[in-house]
Image (cartoon, rainbow, N blue to C red):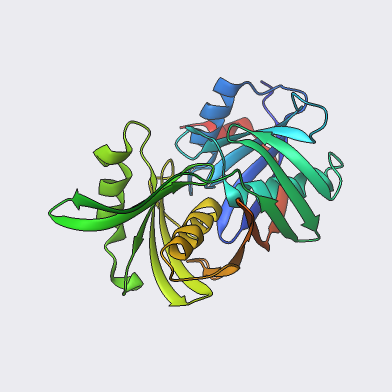
Amino acid sequence: MKENFSFVKMQASGNDFILINNFSREISAEEGRELARRLCRRRLSVGADGLILLEPPEDPAHAFRWRFFNADGSEAEMCGNGGRCAARFAVEEGLARARLSFETLAGVIRAEVQGSRVKVTLTPPQGLALRMELWVGERPLTVHFVNTGVPHAVVLVEHLEEVPLESLGPLLRRHERFSPAGTNVNFVKILSDREIALRTYERGVEGETLACGTGAAASALISTELGRTHFPVRVHTRGGEVLTIHREGETLLLEGETRRLYRGLLHREALLD
C-alpha cells in the first residue's frame, strides 16, 4: 500500500466518514481494517465513524462494490448514512450516474442522488421480533428487533434525554439474545404519528453517534408495526437533521442531506500510534 493517497471526508446527519476510491485495489481488506482503526481515531488522526472503500463491482450492472469498516476495524454489512455518502461520492467522482446501484455485504442497494440530497433503498427487513421481555442489567426491558441491513434493537421510551445510554447501550449491544454478532441499540421517543426522535448506540463505534440511517429505518418500521406511527416517518436525530423513512411494499427507503466536507491527502504519519 502506498504511503500517500487521496480521500474525501463526508458526513450525513452527523455520521462522518472517510471515503477512498479503491478501484485500483491498492488497499486490501486486511489493510482496510487497519486503516479504519488508525484513521478513525478522533484527535489522533483524521477522525470518523467509519471508512468506506469503493471498489470495482462483481456485477458490471452495478456502479461499485463497497467495503465499510467501523472505527474499530470491524467490517459492517451496511450503513444507511454511509451508503448515502458513498452514492454521492461515486457520482461526483464520475463513477456513477445519479440513479445507481451498488453492492454491499447486505445485498444490492439502489440510490438516487439529487445534489446534496440522497435517497437509498435498504435491503428488505428481516428477523422482525416485537415485545421481547429481556432482563438487562438489573431491570426488565421491552425490546423490539429487526435487521435493516445490520441488526437493530429498539426500545421505546418516554424521556429520551434521561436514558442512561452509555450504561444501557453496551448491555443490550452484547445481550445473549443477540449473540454472537451483537446488535446496534436504539432508544426512541414517539413525537406524533409521523415523527419520532432517536438516540443510537452503535456497534463497532461502541458509543453514541449523532445519527444512524439503518437505525432510523428500524425505529420507524418498529414504531409503525406497533401502531404508533405511519409512513412516511420523520426521524429527528441527535445531530439535528431530520431523516425521512419511506416504505414501498416491503422496501424501506432512507432520505436525507449529505455534506462533502473536504478532500485531503493522507500522510503516513496519520497511521502512527
Residue 111 lies left or right of residue 52; in this view the side is right
Say which of 243 and 55 sits in front. Answer: 243
Residue with the most extreme bottom position: 192
Residue 29 picture location, percent across and down? 59, 23
Residue 78 lies left or right of residue 208; in this view the side is right
Residue 239 lies left or right of residue 244; in this view the side is left
Residue 141 picture location, percent across and down? 23, 57
The answer to whether one can see residue 9 in this image is: no
User: From the image, which quarter does the C terminus lie in?
Assistant: top left
All told, the count of numbered labels is 0
The answer to whether one can see residue 111 in this image is: yes
Measuring 25% from the left and 37% from the top, which residue is drawn there? 176
Residue with the most extreme left position: 138
Say which of 116 and 20 sits in front. Answer: 116
Say which of 229 and 90 sits in front. Answer: 229
In this rendering, is residue 141 above or below 72?
below
Measuring 70% from the left and 30% from the top, which residue is drawn there? 4
Residue 245 picture location, percent across and down? 60, 62
Residue 264 picture location, percent across and down? 71, 44
Measuring 65% from the left and 46% from the top, which residue is drawn there? 83
User: From the image, which quarter does the N terminus lie in?
Assistant: top right
Question: Residue 35's quadrant in the figure?
Answer: top right
Measuring 52% from the left and 27% from the top, which residue is drawn there? 34
In this rendering, is residue 42 above or below 186?
above
Question: Residue 198's quadrant in the figure?
Answer: bottom left
